[in-house]
Amino acid sequence: MYNLSMNISFYTNFGILTCAFADLEANIRIFISNLVFGDSEIIASAFLDNSQFSNNIKILKKISRQYWNEQKIFGEILKRMEKLRSTRNLFIHGHWDPFTFGKGNGKARVLDLKTSFNSDEDERTWNHGEVHEFSEDDFQSILTEINSLVEELQQLWQLIGDDEPLLCKKPGGVTVCSKPIEFTINLKESAAEDILNQIFITPKDSDGRD
């Protein structure tokens, strides 16, 4: 059971890191959206709304191949994102216990709910519920890395995108697409004939004959 007075130190730090991961993912999405789709936000949403962190890393890797001068910068950023991915997944999907976090050299524990598989010629091994521990210093290191990646994404955008900053805190907007209007004209038969006669005038000979 949870309550709001539980290990304030742990949950404060955990909450900040969770928000930081969300900020990183938002910056990645907006980077891809602006670079690939420009102002076409509706089309961007069709491709990116359900994209995962790992998928966006793959998309960035593919995009980077067309930027010869900046590909090394892309590569370093992507390598660090990939390294951070498993930690991010623990924050989103892991089962956390504050344990002794905030007490001296205390640490929090997280149970990784996924099952990993390894095999060789003689043995196959499934690892269930691997436990990881994180200290307050570990949390600070993760936060520093996230902030650094966000800043470097911003700098990379300045190089290849636009002089304007890559903003993920811009106010929301609304796109409206109106249904096309169909016009119909209902005329009495005599009125319709008059209009047709005005439009399609049959030329006459000089003597007045049709």
Image: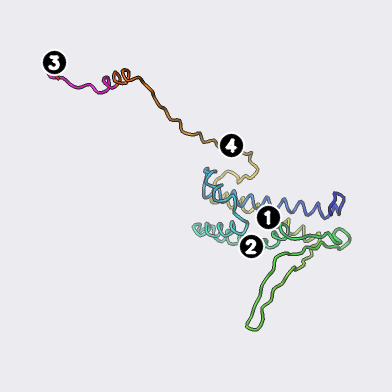
The amino acid at mark 3 is Gly
Q: CA distance from mark 1 to mark 3?
A: 89 Å
For the residues bearing labels 2 and 3, Cβ distance under 8 angstroms: no
Q: Which mark is residue 208?
A: 3
Distance in Å between CA atoms under marks 4 and 3:
63 Å
Per the image, label 1 sits on a secondary structure element best described as helix
Q: Which residues are magenta?
A: 196-209
State yes or no: residue 200 in magenta: yes
Going from N to C along the chain, the mark reached first, 1 or 2, is 2
Residue carrying label 1: 148
Image location of residue 161, percent across then percent down = 54, 48
Question: Is the image coloured rainbow, by chain, by secondary structure, or in one colour?
Answer: rainbow
The one of 115 and 7 positioned closer to us in this rendering: 115
Q: Quadrant of residue 110?
A: bottom right
Tag 2 or tag 4, which sits nearer the N-term? Answer: 2
Q: CA distance from mark 1 to mark 2?
A: 14 Å
* Side (left or right) of 148 relative to 1: left
Write the residue at 73% across / 53% down.
18
Q: CA distance from mark 4 to mark 2?
A: 34 Å
Please name the residue that numbered disc 2 is placed on: 82
Identify the residue position indicated by label 4 in the image. 174
